[in-house]
């Protein structure tokens, strides 16, 4: 069990090895495993961790829905108060762009509604439009230019959003992610007053919950263009089939969630004052300790390795850099929400890197979904397991038998002779066995021989059985 990060409890420091999962994922390089959802949630700072855990216990929402909605709403509250020092010395916004794609009954609505509740109440004094749902890009940009410099796109069930043009307005969304207001086009030329008084920068957070099937359709249709534009690399995506639980409801009182409400109200009240007196790009800046920068650099190297199995070299660099930028923003969000003094510490950055790495793995899984294992490969693994088991029982080091005898086993596995031939070809093609002519009792026969050790075996592994998949 990982030790608590703070003596007062709540939240756990990620271990140096990130508590690697035991199951390989075929969208990751061999030997690289990302943090689990449980580990990412446990990496939240104490107040946020306790709020997440209590939301699950009381409202029953899945931890995937909780993690995304909590981060999104905290990002909105803190981004009106602070920015964070970037890797190049320039400050960047703390706004996050997050999409949660969950199955039915994943708790999307429960998590969204609970975490946005104090924001709705606290923003009543803001006279500009701040919350958007299904909106067209020209309307959104016009509202922001008219003074809605602190805004959020958020919804509990965003099925309609992925059908709208805003979801694929990648250039505009990339500008807003960087707190830039998209440049004017010919449609704005006749509005001189809007041109003259438009702000130079704005905060725009997205925290959209969608159905997993609709997200899959969107990626199939627009994923390549979203990736080519660069916006998809900025978007934190979490696709999960986790189901909600019943939850305790009113039988369990709220404590951590009330503390969350109080802190959100404090941050928004402070942000309303700051944004009245100064532009978005002049908000106070959170510094990052040099040792925390080193933690982030090490994380970025892991991000690049993680993407190397699915992306070309240039895109792995883009993936790693964008994910590191999101890790920096997550660290700033947690630092500001907890009310920590001074610069971001290595502890907080390690937490943020763990969370970002989990999002990165989920991004790769969504953009490059695992392909089904071919039937002949599954049959090949089954046959290898059987043959090596027999060899172990007989005490044989390099078992062999007649090729015809192996083919005769097909009915025992429920296979046709053609399927057995295909299976043998697969095993031999992978280098785990060979069919060779031998002389027995003066007669030429074809022998099926397992090769020990098979290619690619780790030192010290006895190779029983080898892995085709």
Image (cartoon, rainbow, N blue to C red):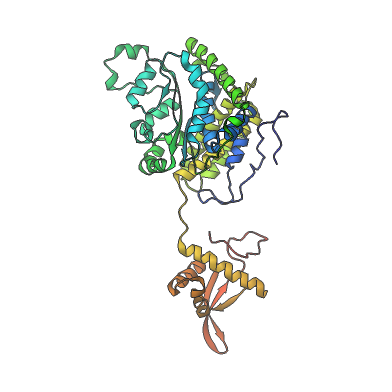
Farthest top residue in view: 277
Relative to 74, does residue 467 appear above or below in the rendering? below
- Given residues 77 and 453, the one toward you in this image is 77
Image location of residue 128, percent across then percent down: 41, 15
The residue located at (61%, 61%) in the rendering is 457
- Given residues 383 and 326, the one toward you in this image is 383
- Given residues 443 and 424, the one toward you in this image is 424
The residue located at (32%, 11%) in the rendering is 193
Relative to 271, does residue 468 appear above or below in the rendering? below
- In the rendered image, is residue 267 in sight? yes
The residue located at (50%, 78%) in the rendering is 408
Q: Quadrant of the N terminus?
A: top right
Q: Quadrant of residue 263?
A: top right
- Given residues 47 and 78, the one toward you in this image is 47
Q: In the image, 425: left or right of 182? A: right
Image location of residue 431, percent across then percent down: 53, 66
Image location of residue 88, percent across then percent down: 53, 26
The residue located at (70%, 30%) in the rendering is 9
- In the rendered image, is residue 451 in sight? no
Image location of residue 443, percent across then percent down: 53, 88
């Amino acid at each position: 069990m990982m030790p608590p990060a703070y003596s007062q409890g709540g939240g756990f420091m990620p271990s140096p090895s990130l508590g690697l999962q035991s199951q390989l994922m075929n969208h990751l390089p061999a030997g690289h495993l990302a943090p689990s959802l449980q580990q990412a949630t446990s990496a939240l700072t104490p107040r946020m961790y306790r709020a997440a855990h209590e939301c699950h216990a009381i409202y029953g929402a899945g931890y995937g829905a909780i993690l995304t909605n909590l981060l999104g709403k905290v990002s909105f509250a803190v981004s009106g108060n602070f920015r964070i020092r970037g890797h190049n010395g320039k400050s960047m916004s703390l706004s996050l762009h997050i999409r949660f794609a969950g199955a039915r009954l994943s708790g999307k609505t429960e998590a969204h509604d609970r975490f946005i509740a104090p924001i709705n109440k606290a923003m009543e004094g803001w006279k500009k439009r701040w919350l958007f749902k299904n909106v067209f890009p020209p309307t959104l940009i016009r509202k922001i230019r008219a003074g809605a410099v602190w805004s959020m796109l958020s919804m509990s069930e965003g099925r309609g959003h992925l059908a709208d043009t805003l979801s694929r307005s990648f250039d505009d969304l990339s500008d807003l992610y960087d707190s830039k207001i998209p440049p004017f086009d010919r449609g704005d030329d006749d509005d001189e007053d809007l041109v003259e008084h438009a702000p130079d920068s704005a905060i725009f957070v997205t925290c959209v919950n969608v159905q997993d099937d609709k997200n899959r359709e969107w990626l199939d249709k627009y994923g390549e263009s979203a990736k080519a534009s660069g916006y998809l690399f900025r978007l934190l995506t979490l696709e999960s089939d986790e189901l909600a639980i019943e939850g305790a409801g009113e039988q369990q009182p709220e404590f951590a969630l009330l503390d969350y409400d109080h802190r959100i109200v404090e941050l928004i009240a402070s942000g309303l004052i700051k944004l009245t007196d100064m532009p978005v790009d002049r908000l106070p800046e959170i510094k990052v300790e040099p040792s925390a920068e080193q933690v982030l650099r090490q994380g970025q190297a892991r991000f690049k390795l993680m993407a190397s199995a699915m992306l070309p070299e240039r895109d792995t660099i883009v993936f790693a850099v964008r994910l590191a930028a999101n890790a920096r923003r997550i660290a700033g969000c947690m630092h500001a929400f907890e009310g920590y003094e001074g610069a971001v510490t290595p502890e907080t950055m390690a937490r943020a890197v763990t969370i970002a790495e989990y999002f990165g793995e989920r991004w790769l899984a969504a953009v490059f979904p695992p392909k089904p294992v071919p039937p002949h490969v599954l049959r090949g693994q089954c046959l290898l397991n059987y043959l090596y088991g027999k060899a172990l029982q007989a005490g044989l080091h390099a078992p062999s038998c007649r090729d015809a005898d192996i083919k005769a086993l097909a009915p025992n596995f429920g296979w046709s002779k053609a399927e057995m031939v295909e299976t043998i070809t697969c095993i031999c093609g992978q280098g785990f066995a060979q069919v060779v002519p031998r002389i027995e009792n003066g007669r030429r026969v074809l022998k099926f021989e397992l090769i020990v050790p098979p290619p690619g075996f780790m030192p010290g592994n006895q190779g029983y059985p080898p892995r085709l998949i």
